Image: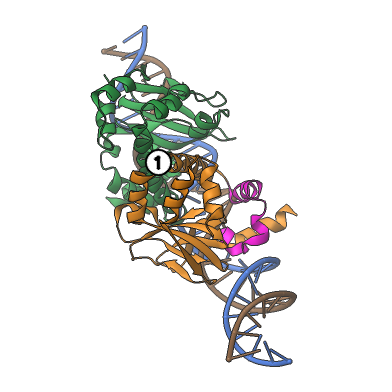
Chain colours: A green, B orange, C brown, D blue
Amino acid sequence: MFDLLFQHIQEKVSLSPAEIDTLGTYFTIKQLKKRQYLLQEGDVCKQLAFVIHGAVKSYTIDDKGHEHISLIGWEGWWISDFRSYIYGEPAILNIDAIEDTTLALLSKQNYEKMFVEVPMMEKYFRVLYQNSLVTKDRRLISSNTYTAEEKFKAMIDTYPQIVHRIPQQLIASYLGITPETLSRIKKRLI
Amino acid sequence: MFDLLFQHIQEKVSLSPAEIDTLGTYFTIKQLKKRQYLLQEGDVCKQLAFVIHGAVKSYTIDDKGHEHISLIGWEGWWISDFRSYIYGEPAILNIDAIEDTTLALLSKQNYEKMFVEVPMMEKYFRVLYQNSLVTKDRRLISSNTYTAEEKFKAMIDTYPQIVHRIPQQLIASYLGITPETLSRIKKRLI
DNA sequence: GCCTACCATTGATCTACAGCAAGCGTTTCA
DNA sequence: TGAAACGCTTGCTGTAGATCAATGGTAGGC
């Protein structure tokens, strides 16, 4: 059940079988149906989620009721409202399933315990966060520098599979543009 | 010389005097005059820099020659082209000094050595990156959701001192707007 | 297998912000 | 100490992308 997760971890650090066993006790499995929530704005985010199968999105909703997607994650991605998870504040993000999804969940309590009992996980998360920062830095630059068309092109360069899997209105929201604009861009690119 | 750095580290993890001594051997001091470069686009970023005194900015330059600031850092901030530093790719960022600045530099080699010889630093950087991710997540949401005025308000809420220290055109660039727009927003807010 | 809900497209209009240019106070440095 | 460079403001105009609205296609639930 946790194969993908352990594989993902062992790409970054090496663990003994005993450590793997210990790790296994920290996680629980959760199934989400398409459109089902993992987290709703205002609640405290109690779980860090690793996607074993399926796809999820995290997003805010503004005053006008518009969704702004901050992350789309599928197999091998971690997702949460990080600030809420770490500091116990009410979440500003919603997280729900784009497809039927299987998640591995890690509670805050187990997160902290894990670092004490399996110190090698400090390295795993240090490297995971390090890579994640690299990605977010580029995304932030892209968001402030590029036109809508350039952003879309950069996205299909980075994630070519995404257009076949994720509805275009979600991609538009992730890029910070409207579905109409994305539609017009696609037309222009053909 | 490294007092602020060690203090910063010991807020997150506790280190023995021996570990502090070892750490001290990894860092070198660098002085930058105002407008002097630490890193130029195209070079490989060899150093992770911690600001001991002064202020620096990292930015890209687009086809039209416009600066887009990705980070402004002062005392207690880390700065680099992270992707370049980690993966050895040519940097897309420029980094230079906004004021006369003193930096503590950590080479990639010492960065890796540090994690082997002072494993507690895994935790320090895990927590540092964790916090940094929280900040960048919010900034990304802000960038895609808010109007220019809302972004500016959010910035002075988060960093009230910034308007007294950093020229407004740099703040505008950091927010992804033009200096003219920022000027008009300020007028509107009075 | 039909009905409804969802999704992409396209056209017409609107708006926040960019771009350009000119003017003015203030720092900088020969 | 005076010229030059710099930073901020303000007015005018341009434009990328948002918004609103209508249409057609496709997929999932009963």
Which segment did they paint magenta?
A: B147-173
The residue tagged 1 is B122
For badge 1, the amino acid type reads Glu
- Residue that lies at the very extreme toward the front in this rendered image: B18
Quadrant in which residue B39 is drawn: bottom left
**In this rendering, does residue A122 appear at all?**
yes
Most foreground residue, A162 or D3: D3
Q: Is residue B156 magenta?
A: yes
Q: Quadrant of the N terminus of chain B?
A: bottom right
**Picture residue at 59% right of the left edge, 64% below the top:** B169
* Chain of residue at mark 1: B
| Quarter residue A15 falls in | top left
Number of residues whose C-alpha sits closer than 10 Å to that of mark 1, classed few (under 14), some (14–19) or many (20 or more): many
Q: Is residue C3 above or below residue A87?
A: above
Give the secondary structure at mark 1. Answer: helix
Q: Is residue B60 magenta?
A: no
